[in-house]
Image: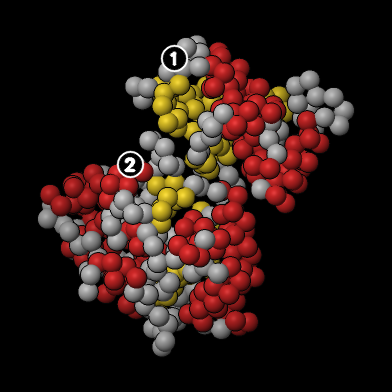
Amino acid sequence: MSRKQQLHRPGPQPGPPADDTGCAILHVDMDAFFVSVELLERPELRGRPVVVGGAGPRGVVSAASYEARGFGVHSAMPMTRARRLCPQAVVLPVSHGKYSRVSAAVFEIFRSVTPLVEGLSLDEAFLDVAGARRRLGRPAAIAQLIRDQVRDQQGITCSVGVANTKFVAKLASTRCKPDGLLVVPADGVVDFLHPLPVASLWGVGERTEQALTRLGLRTVGQLAQVPLSTLQRELGNALGRHLHELAWGRDPREVVPHTPDKSIGAEETFDTDVDDPEVIRRELLRLAERVGARLRESGNAGRTVSVKLRMADFKTITRSRTLAEPTDLARVIYVTARELYEGAGLERVRLRLVGVRVENLGPAGEAPRQLAFDEPDNGWREAERAMDQVAHRFGRGAVRPAALVRRAAEGDARDGRDGRQ
């Protein structure tokens, strides 16, 4: 069987499932989420290699279909390399609004099962279904119910790992992709873990993997047999103990229903380095619009605005300012970001990347009313809320500041990258 065929074979299915007694933790992961959402509108591309990401010379792959992955394409890869590996791939731009809408609908399905939902990203979450068993059945049955509802209601697929800990459930969902379900019995955790490569353990990056390889440790089982004191001597006390516990399937972390965002931001890598202050200011405006919209969508406001400025030589500086009152207004965010940029003394320096971020977040309802600079009555706040309504109905690009409309008309539009921490 070829590698490409292997990638298309559905993962382990639940009929009949393994013993799920005591396995109340589910890890649900959408399959090639960005691509899957795009294919809802482009069904003629099904079965073809599809890549979602920035198309410019500095574009990065955000997601790849399983057909594209068969050629070695993966997320975070430079788009130029992806095109070399798979020249026949169809490249689609990133459409964050579409992904957010589908993600919200998927998470509604999760929360109809249990309130204990811990979102990790738009397309990934942990669920604790212990309290849902009397109503919906055993964990494996609940996992299958979720898979069925996601497919029927949203037209996309997901893979689900079922286990007694978060760590093992996440590993299980990875092992059964795409479109699979895998139960790891509580008494079978060690048998499941020990044949896996050490890189499967959380906390094992490239450097740690190299250190373990030098010790002759290539599988989780080999690592598990090493005395804790030896691991701590070689890797440090904290990491050594962490890996020792995971190697025996011990992970005490609970599913945390909601972890508030620490910050909301967006950044842009230019196709070519830019030293025109007007272009930089327009980019800051575009990013501020995006951040403001995401703040309002999340119901948050923030007190600290920061800018990230990366020069052509990759030297990066950040500047921040804490406001007197929290804000969720793009106008306030933009004016602050622009002043931070102008105060950094880089107005004639070639920049490779700029970013805008708002931190120190809290519920917007608890924030005092923050007037934008030079805001009249019924001013910027009402205008931005009206823009939100139009964007919700017609898409984010339907209404935007005149400076950005001119920029798009000049053919200078680019794909950006959003970030939450």
> Label 2 belongs to which residue?
80
Residue at 65% over, 44% down:
396
> Label 1 belongs to which residue?
349
Label 2 vs label 1: CA separation? Answer: 26 Å
Q: Residue 240 in the image: x percent, y percent?
A: 27, 51
Report which quarter residue 266 is drawn in.
top right
Residue at 60% over, 49% down:
97
| Residue extending furthest toward the bottom | 16
Q: Is residue 415 visible?
A: yes
Vertical placement of residue 130 versus 256, above or below: below
Q: Residue 219 in the image: x percent, y percent?
A: 20, 62
Quadrant of the image containing the N terminus: bottom left
Q: Residue 215 in the image: x percent, y percent?
A: 13, 52
Q: Residue 154 in the image: x percent, y percent?
A: 58, 68
Which amino acid is tagged 2?
Answer: Thr
Badge 2 or badge 1: first in the primary sequence: 2
Neighbourhood count class around disc 2 (C-alpha, 10 Å): few under 14, some 14–19, many 20 upward: some
Nearer-the-camera pick, 32 or 211: 32
Q: Is residue 202 visible?
A: no
- Please give left or right for residue 347 compared with residue 172 in the image: right
Mark 2 vs mark 1, foreground winner is: 2
Vertical placement of residue 325 versus 153, above or below: above
Mark 1 secondary-structure assignment: loop
